[in-house]
């Protein structure tokens, strides 16, 4: 018997997307998601990882928008975790959707980069990998236990970053950054797994959670814009597909900054974008990923602070 999503969520999705697309989303919640990973180029080459997979009879398929990302056809996370390339930090198990924000940010070497809600470190280590460990990365995480997990992953991946154990909303405005990634805490409406989490979802996925997430997201995005240098760019992302946590957050911030023309949306331009299953968005140039067997539901927007 198929588990059912919370009734209030179904109504919210139908209001936002209509019945047909809501049905697609609900099917995505039921799908068994494939194991995906990226090669950590700080420690390994793509060719080397491919050879090891083939030696272990593990079938894979590449991803159009990233040479480092792979979808596994016949192996589970547990099987991958038994491989030396995993134990040595040469690969990182990560959902395809969560790989998108760092790639869209286009982090640069020698730049001061802030990852505002960094734990467990997938995106932080990805930024370090993209910049060949030559960027000045500050990874912020307020929870001490999660910050320790972040430090562990940084060390395992050979990634260089300064870990700031602090609520990102309280970072002193004295600081300023060339690039910022704000993968904001959210309801997780894009990542719901109804195959085995129905009871947990019923207890934890609530309207109150969405409302609490919205308040945090607005505060974090305001802070990010304050910390971003004039003329520079940041990425705002969530693993939610609800407009309340995505477009409406951006519209609120855009409205607040309208008189000063302080920020603008930068249209996302990504090679291989046509391969990604997308939902419609209410702000041109942003993207929202449809959950299915390969992707989690995810929202990404790129923002420029006008100088």
Image (spheres, rainbow, N blue to C red):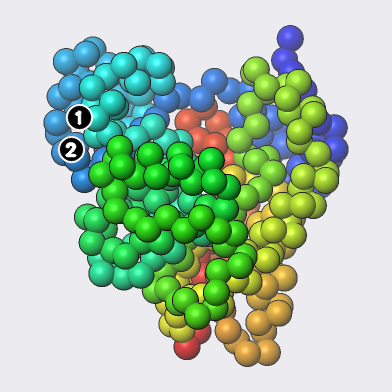
Q: In whole angstroms, how far apart are the C-alphas of marks 2 and 1?
A: 7 Å
| Residues marked 2 and 1 touching at CB (< 8 Å) | yes
- Identify the element where label 2 is drawn: loop
* Residue 49 tag number: 1
Along the line of sight, which residue is nearer the eye, 236 or 154? 154
Q: Position of residue 234 (x, y in %)?
A: 47, 67
Residue plotted at (61% across, 29% down)? 28
Comparing 297 with 147, the one in front is 147
- Residue 262 visible here: yes
Sort mark 2 into few (<14), some (14-19) or many (20+) by Cα contacts within 10 Å: some
Question: Residue sitting at 61 percent across and 35 percent down?
Answer: 191
Q: Report whether 213 appears left or right of 135.
A: right
Number of disc labels: 2
Quadrant in the rendering for residue 168: bottom right
Q: Which residue is mark 2?
A: 44
Residue 37 place in picture, x, y as percent: 36, 33
Looking at the image, residue 169 lies above or below residue 76: below
Mark 2 or 1, closer to the camera: 2
- Residue located 45% across and 39% down the image: 149
Give the image location of residue 284, x and y in percent: 58, 65
Q: Work out which residue is located at the far top of the displayed protein and give it.
A: 1
Q: Residue at x 72, y 37 (%)?
A: 22
């Amino acid at each position: 018997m198929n588990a059912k999503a919370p009734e209030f969520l179904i109504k919210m999705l139908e209001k936002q997307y209509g019945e047909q697309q809501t049905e697609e989303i609900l099917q995505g919640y039921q799908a068994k998601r494939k194991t995906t990973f990226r090669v950590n180029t700080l420690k390994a080459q793509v060719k080397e990882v491919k050879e090891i997979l083939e030696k272990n009879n593990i079938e894979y398929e590449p991803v159009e928008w990233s040479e480092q990302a792979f979808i596994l056809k016949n192996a589970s996370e547990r099987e991958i975790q038994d491989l030396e390339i995993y134990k040595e930090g040469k690969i990182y198990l990560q959902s395809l959707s969560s790989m998108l924000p760092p790639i869209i940010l286009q982090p640069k070497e020698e730049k001061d980069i802030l990852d505002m809600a960094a734990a467990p470190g997938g995106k932080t280590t990805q930024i370090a990998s993209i910049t060949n460990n030559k960027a000045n990365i500050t990874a912020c995480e307020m929870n001490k236990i999660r910050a320790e997990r972040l430090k562990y992953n940084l060390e395992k991946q050979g990634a260089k970053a300064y870990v700031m154990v602090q609520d990102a909303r309280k970072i002193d405005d004295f600081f300023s950054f060339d690039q910022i990634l704000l993968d904001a805490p959210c309801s997780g409406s894009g990542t719901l797994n109804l195959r085995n989490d129905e009871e947990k979802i019923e207890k934890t996925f609530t309207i109150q959670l969405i409302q609490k997430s919205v308040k945090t997201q607005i505060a974090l995005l305001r802070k990010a814009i304050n910390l971003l240098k004039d003329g520079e760019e940041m990425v705002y992302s969530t693993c939610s597909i609800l407009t309340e946590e995505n477009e409406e957050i951006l519209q609120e911030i855009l409205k607040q900054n309208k008189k000063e023309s302080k920020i603008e949306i930068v249209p996302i331009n990504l090679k291989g974008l046509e391969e990604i299953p997308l939902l419609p968005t209410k702000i041109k140039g942003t993207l929202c990923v449809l959950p299915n067997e390969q992707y989690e539901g995810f929202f990404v927007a790129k923002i420029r602070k006008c100088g």
